[in-house]
Image (spheres, coloured by chain):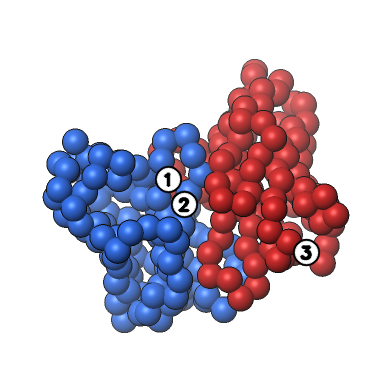
Amino acid sequence: ETGVTQSPTHLIKTRGQQVTLRCSSQSGHNTVSWYQQALGQGPQFIFQYYREEENGRGNFPPRFSGLQFPNYSSELNVNALELDDSALYLCASSPTATTNEKLFFGSGTQLSVL
Amino acid sequence: GENVGLHLPTLSVQEGDNSIINCAYSNSASDYFIWYKQESGKGPQFIIDIRSNMDKRQGQRVTVLLNKTVKHLSLQIAATQPGDSAVYFCAEKSTGGFKTIFGAGTRLFVKA
């Protein structure tokens, strides 16, 4: 088990709504990455936060946004939800963004958009 | 996945046999490679990693091989056990890059 916790574990929303997902990183880690994993696929990189700043972004529209707090916990916000946003959202922390390090994943939030 | 793919989507092995999961990558700049295991209802868990200055690395019952010439990565699991049943992802990263790129995954079934 990693020390990364995500909440909620499951969530059901309707199209057009907004959602906020939360992540607590492992102690001592200052970098958090968010991934979207559709059913039967590999995780797709959304963005990364390093010391409270967005450090990089994948091919996701601006309605996907995030925050990182001074304690390095993080939020993923998705506005104007679409049916295709239904997926498992994974948060991963790592000791730092400046070197190649493995990721420590939480168990994810399963989002269903109806 | 983006630049990392797998040759087989599913692999079925007998308990006690060795398993080999293969992966191809396309980014020549990648210099760090990782294998993750994902069980149902959980996030991916680190298994083993290898840096580009190596071609083989061994862990407990697992070995990763890296062939940079043909951009190929493999994971070998010795004496496969029922608890090894999961989806396995290879992933890549480059120094100075900010994201780890995952392949599509291989589902490993272990028959008792």
Q: Which amino acid does the dot numbered 3 rest on?
A: Ser
Q: Residues within 10 Å of mark 1 (few under 14, many from 20)?
A: many
Residue A53 locus on image (x, y percent)? 37, 79
Nearest-to-viewer mark from 2 and 3: 2
Is residue A102 depicted above or below A72 in this figure?
A: above
Q: Earlier in the sequence, mark 2 or mark 1?
A: 1
Q: Nearer the viewer, residue B54 or B85?
A: B54
Q: CB of mark 2 within 8 Å of CB of mark 1?
A: yes
Q: Which amino acid does the dot numbered 2 rest on?
A: Gln
Q: Label 2, label 3: how many angstroms apart (C-alpha)?
A: 23 Å
Residue B11 locus on image (x, y percent)? 66, 27
Residue B72 locus on image (x, y percent)? 77, 48
Q: Nearer the viewer, residue B3 or B63?
A: B3
Q: Colour of chain A?
A: blue
Q: Secondary structure at mark 3?
A: loop
What residue is pinned by disc 3? Answer: B52
The numbered dot on residue A37 is: 1
Residue shown at 15% from the left, 41% from the top: A14
On screen, residue A79 versus residue B34, left or right, reads left
Q: Label 1, label 3: how many angstroms apart (C-alpha)?
A: 27 Å
Rendered image quadrant of residue A50: bottom left
Q: Which amino acid does the dot numbered 1 rest on?
A: Gln
- Report the chain holding disc 3: B
Q: Quadrant of the C terminus of chain A?
A: top left
Q: Colour of chain B?
A: red
Q: Secondary structure at mark 1?
A: strand
The numbered dot on residue A44 is: 2
Instruction: Note whether residue B47 is visible.
Output: no
Q: Residues within 10 Å of mark 2 (few under 14, many from 20)?
A: many
